[in-house]
Protein backbone atom coordinates (compact mmCIF):
# COMPACT_ATOMS: atom_id res chain seq x y z
CA UNK A 1 0.00 0.00 0.00
CA UNK A 2 1.45 3.34 -1.03
CA UNK A 3 1.26 6.13 1.52
CA UNK A 4 0.21 9.58 0.42
CA UNK A 5 2.82 12.21 1.27
CA UNK A 6 2.60 15.99 1.43
CA UNK A 7 5.27 16.47 -1.26
CA UNK A 8 4.19 15.47 -4.75
CA UNK A 9 5.41 11.95 -5.52
CA UNK A 10 6.30 10.68 -8.98
CA UNK A 11 6.08 7.09 -10.21
CA UNK A 12 7.87 6.35 -13.48
CA UNK A 13 6.95 3.37 -15.69
CA UNK A 14 8.82 1.99 -18.68
CA UNK A 15 6.54 0.57 -21.39
CA UNK A 16 7.94 -2.21 -23.60
CA UNK A 17 8.48 -5.30 -21.45
CA UNK A 18 7.16 -3.55 -18.35
CA UNK A 19 3.58 -2.55 -19.12
CA UNK A 20 3.27 -4.79 -22.20
CA UNK A 21 5.08 -7.95 -23.19
CA UNK A 22 7.52 -7.60 -26.07
CA UNK A 23 8.55 -4.76 -28.37
CA UNK A 24 6.05 -2.15 -29.55
CA UNK A 25 8.04 -1.44 -32.74
CA UNK A 26 7.69 -5.08 -33.80
CA UNK A 27 3.98 -4.86 -32.95
CA UNK A 28 3.70 -1.68 -35.04
CA UNK A 29 5.25 -3.33 -38.09
CA UNK A 30 3.07 -6.44 -37.82
CA UNK A 31 -0.04 -4.32 -37.37
CA UNK A 32 0.92 -2.22 -40.40
CA UNK A 33 1.43 -5.35 -42.46
CA UNK A 34 -1.97 -6.63 -41.38
CA UNK A 35 -3.47 -3.33 -42.57
CA UNK A 36 -1.45 -3.58 -45.81
CA UNK A 37 0.40 -0.35 -45.08
CA UNK A 38 3.87 -1.88 -45.40
CA UNK A 39 5.12 -4.33 -47.99
CA UNK A 40 6.83 -7.63 -47.26
CA UNK A 41 10.05 -6.05 -48.52
CA UNK A 42 9.55 -3.08 -46.19
CA UNK A 43 9.02 -5.48 -43.31
CA UNK A 44 12.22 -7.33 -44.16
CA UNK A 45 14.18 -4.07 -44.37
CA UNK A 46 12.90 -3.02 -40.95
CA UNK A 47 13.82 -6.45 -39.52
CA UNK A 48 17.29 -6.12 -41.07
CA UNK A 49 17.92 -2.78 -39.39
CA UNK A 50 16.56 -4.16 -36.14
CA UNK A 51 19.09 -6.98 -36.35
CA UNK A 52 21.89 -4.50 -37.12
CA UNK A 53 20.94 -2.51 -34.03
CA UNK A 54 20.99 -5.57 -31.78
CA UNK A 55 24.41 -6.44 -33.21
CA UNK A 56 25.48 -2.84 -32.43
CA UNK A 57 26.18 -2.17 -36.11
CA UNK A 58 23.80 0.78 -36.29
CA UNK A 59 22.28 3.18 -33.78
CA UNK A 60 18.80 3.06 -32.29
CA UNK A 61 17.52 6.15 -34.10
CA UNK A 62 18.51 4.81 -37.52
CA UNK A 63 16.83 1.48 -36.80
CA UNK A 64 13.68 3.22 -35.57
CA UNK A 65 13.61 5.58 -38.54
CA UNK A 66 13.77 2.66 -40.95
CA UNK A 67 10.98 0.91 -39.03
CA UNK A 68 8.78 4.02 -39.05
CA UNK A 69 9.50 5.17 -42.62
CA UNK A 70 6.26 3.68 -44.00
CA UNK A 71 4.30 6.20 -41.88
CA UNK A 72 5.58 9.09 -43.98
CA UNK A 73 3.87 7.64 -47.05
CA UNK A 74 0.41 7.64 -45.44
CA UNK A 75 -1.87 10.74 -45.67
CA UNK A 76 -2.10 12.55 -42.34
CA UNK A 77 -5.73 11.72 -41.48
CA UNK A 78 -5.28 8.03 -42.35
CA UNK A 79 -1.96 7.92 -40.47
CA UNK A 80 -3.46 9.34 -37.28
CA UNK A 81 -6.43 6.98 -37.50
CA UNK A 82 -4.04 4.04 -37.91
CA UNK A 83 -1.87 5.15 -34.98
CA UNK A 84 -4.88 5.61 -32.69
CA UNK A 85 -6.11 2.14 -33.57
CA UNK A 86 -2.66 0.69 -33.00
CA UNK A 87 -2.39 2.43 -29.63
CA UNK A 88 -5.64 0.75 -28.60
CA UNK A 89 -4.19 -2.67 -29.43
CA UNK A 90 -1.15 -1.93 -27.27
CA UNK A 91 -3.31 -0.82 -24.35
CA UNK A 92 -5.34 -4.01 -24.69
CA UNK A 93 -2.10 -6.00 -24.29
CA UNK A 94 -1.13 -4.35 -21.01
CA UNK A 95 -0.32 -6.66 -18.12
CA UNK A 96 -3.19 -6.55 -15.59
CA UNK A 97 -0.61 -6.28 -12.82
CA UNK A 98 0.97 -3.23 -14.41
CA UNK A 99 -2.40 -1.51 -14.75
CA UNK A 100 -3.17 -2.34 -11.14
CA UNK A 101 0.16 -0.88 -10.01
CA UNK A 102 -0.57 2.33 -11.91
CA UNK A 103 -3.99 2.51 -10.28
CA UNK A 104 -2.44 2.07 -6.83
CA UNK A 105 -0.09 4.97 -7.41
CA UNK A 106 -2.90 7.16 -8.70
CA UNK A 107 -5.06 6.24 -5.69
CA UNK A 108 -2.19 7.23 -3.38
CA UNK A 109 -2.03 10.63 -5.05
CA UNK A 110 1.18 9.95 -6.96
CA UNK A 111 1.75 11.39 -10.43
CA UNK A 112 2.39 8.64 -12.98
CA UNK A 113 4.80 9.25 -15.87
CA UNK A 114 5.20 6.81 -18.75
CA UNK A 115 8.86 7.09 -19.80
CA UNK A 116 9.68 5.02 -22.87
CA UNK A 117 12.15 4.65 -25.72
CA UNK A 118 9.13 4.03 -27.95
CA UNK A 119 8.11 6.85 -30.23
CA UNK A 120 5.67 9.67 -29.62
CA UNK A 121 3.75 9.09 -32.86
CA UNK A 122 1.77 6.32 -31.16
CA UNK A 123 2.77 6.61 -27.49
CA UNK A 124 0.88 9.92 -27.25
CA UNK A 125 -2.29 7.92 -27.79
CA UNK A 126 -1.26 5.05 -25.51
CA UNK A 127 -0.42 6.74 -22.22
CA UNK A 128 -3.92 7.99 -21.26
CA UNK A 129 -5.37 4.57 -22.13
CA UNK A 130 -3.30 2.86 -19.44
CA UNK A 131 -3.90 5.49 -16.78
CA UNK A 132 -0.62 7.42 -16.99
CA UNK A 133 -0.81 11.20 -16.67
CA UNK A 134 2.31 12.30 -18.51
CA UNK A 135 4.48 10.96 -21.31
CA UNK A 136 8.22 11.21 -21.90
CA UNK A 137 9.46 9.26 -24.93
CA UNK A 138 11.46 9.37 -28.15
CA UNK A 139 10.07 12.32 -30.15
CA UNK A 140 8.73 12.11 -33.70
CA UNK A 141 7.81 14.77 -36.21
CA UNK A 142 4.18 15.22 -37.36
CA UNK A 143 4.85 12.88 -40.31
CA UNK A 144 6.14 10.08 -38.08
CA UNK A 145 9.81 10.85 -38.73
CA UNK A 146 11.92 9.88 -35.69
CA UNK A 147 13.72 12.95 -34.36
CA UNK A 148 15.48 11.72 -31.24
CA UNK A 149 17.21 11.59 -28.91
CA UNK A 150 16.39 7.98 -28.03
CA UNK A 151 14.73 8.00 -24.60
CA UNK A 152 16.73 5.15 -23.07
CA UNK A 153 19.36 4.75 -20.37
CA UNK A 154 20.66 8.01 -18.94
CA UNK A 155 18.39 9.95 -21.32
CA UNK A 156 15.40 8.75 -19.27
CA UNK A 157 16.89 10.34 -16.17
CA UNK A 158 17.65 13.57 -18.03
CA UNK A 159 14.10 13.79 -19.38
CA UNK A 160 12.48 13.06 -16.02
CA UNK A 161 14.73 15.55 -14.22
CA UNK A 162 13.97 18.17 -16.89
CA UNK A 163 10.24 17.54 -16.35
CA UNK A 164 10.65 17.89 -12.59
CA UNK A 165 12.81 21.02 -12.84
CA UNK A 166 10.23 22.73 -15.06
CA UNK A 167 7.68 22.24 -12.28
CA UNK A 168 10.09 23.03 -9.43
CA UNK A 169 9.70 19.51 -8.04
CA UNK A 170 12.81 18.05 -6.34
CA UNK A 171 14.48 15.05 -7.93
CA UNK A 172 13.92 13.15 -4.69
CA UNK A 173 10.19 13.10 -5.50
CA UNK A 174 10.65 9.98 -7.68
CA UNK A 175 9.06 7.54 -5.26
CA UNK A 176 9.21 4.50 -7.57
CA UNK A 177 10.38 3.47 -11.02
CA UNK A 178 9.50 0.32 -12.95
CA UNK A 179 11.53 -1.26 -15.75
CA UNK A 180 12.61 -4.54 -17.26
CA UNK A 181 16.10 -4.03 -18.68
CA UNK A 182 19.47 -2.42 -18.13
CA UNK A 183 18.24 0.40 -20.37
CA UNK A 184 16.01 1.29 -17.43
CA UNK A 185 18.75 0.95 -14.80
CA UNK A 186 19.61 4.68 -14.53
CA UNK A 187 16.02 5.77 -13.85
CA UNK A 188 15.50 2.83 -11.48
CA UNK A 189 18.54 3.88 -9.47
CA UNK A 190 17.30 7.49 -9.43
CA UNK A 191 14.15 6.42 -7.58
CA UNK A 192 13.45 5.67 -3.93
CA UNK A 193 11.91 2.30 -4.86
CA UNK A 194 13.35 0.74 -8.02
CA UNK A 195 11.30 -2.19 -9.30
CA UNK A 196 12.79 -4.44 -11.96
CA UNK A 197 10.11 -6.59 -13.57
CA UNK A 198 10.65 -10.27 -14.14
CA UNK A 199 8.92 -10.91 -17.46
CA UNK A 200 8.96 -14.68 -17.06
CA UNK A 201 6.87 -14.60 -13.93
CA UNK A 202 4.60 -11.55 -14.21
CA UNK A 203 3.41 -10.04 -11.92
CA UNK A 204 6.06 -11.26 -9.52
CA UNK A 205 8.30 -8.23 -9.31
CA UNK A 206 11.65 -7.94 -7.60
CA UNK A 207 11.52 -4.88 -5.41
CA UNK A 208 15.03 -3.70 -4.76
CA UNK A 209 16.00 -0.79 -2.55
CA UNK A 210 19.26 0.69 -3.83
CA UNK A 211 20.37 -2.48 -5.61
CA UNK A 212 24.03 -3.24 -6.14
CA UNK A 213 25.42 -3.73 -9.64
CA UNK A 214 25.80 -7.44 -8.89
CA UNK A 215 22.15 -7.75 -7.95
CA UNK A 216 21.12 -6.02 -11.17
CA UNK A 217 23.27 -8.51 -13.08
CA UNK A 218 21.56 -11.41 -11.34
CA UNK A 219 18.05 -10.15 -12.08
CA UNK A 220 18.89 -9.31 -15.69
CA UNK A 221 20.23 -12.85 -16.04
CA UNK A 222 16.81 -14.01 -14.82
CA UNK A 223 15.29 -12.23 -17.81
CA UNK A 224 17.95 -13.54 -20.16
CA UNK A 225 19.45 -10.07 -20.66
CA UNK A 226 22.98 -8.74 -20.74
CA UNK A 227 23.92 -6.06 -18.25
CA UNK A 228 26.17 -4.23 -20.67
Image: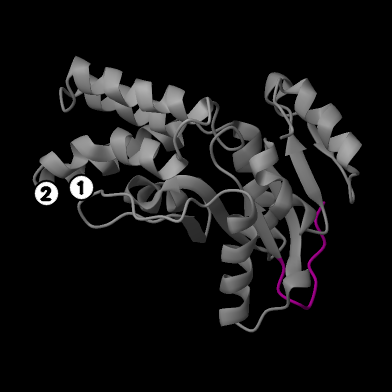
Q: Is residue 95 left or right of residue 175?
A: left
The label shown at residue 77 is 2
Residues at circles 1 and 2 in contact by the CB criterion of under 8 Å = yes
Which range of residues does the magenta coloring cover? 1-9
Quarter where residue 37 is shown: top left
Identified at 80% across, 56% down, the residue is: 2
Is 5 a magenta residue? yes
Query: Which residue is under mark 1?
Result: 80
Question: How far across and how far down the image is residue 135, in percent?
Answer: 48, 58
Identified at 67% across, 45% down, the residue is: 184
Q: Nearer the viewer, residue 213 or 83?
A: 213
Residue furthest front in the image: 57
Under circle 1, the secondary element is helix
Identified at 65% across, 60% down, the residue is: 157
Question: How far across and how far down the image is residue 182, in percent?
Answer: 70, 39
Under circle 2, the secondary element is helix
Amino acid sequence: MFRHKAMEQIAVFDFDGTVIRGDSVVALLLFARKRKLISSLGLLKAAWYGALYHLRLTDALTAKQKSHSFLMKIPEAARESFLREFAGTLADRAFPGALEQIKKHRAAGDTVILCSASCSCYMRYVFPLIGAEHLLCTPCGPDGRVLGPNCRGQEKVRRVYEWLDARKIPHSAICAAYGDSMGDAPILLASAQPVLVNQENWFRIDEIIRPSEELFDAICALNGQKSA
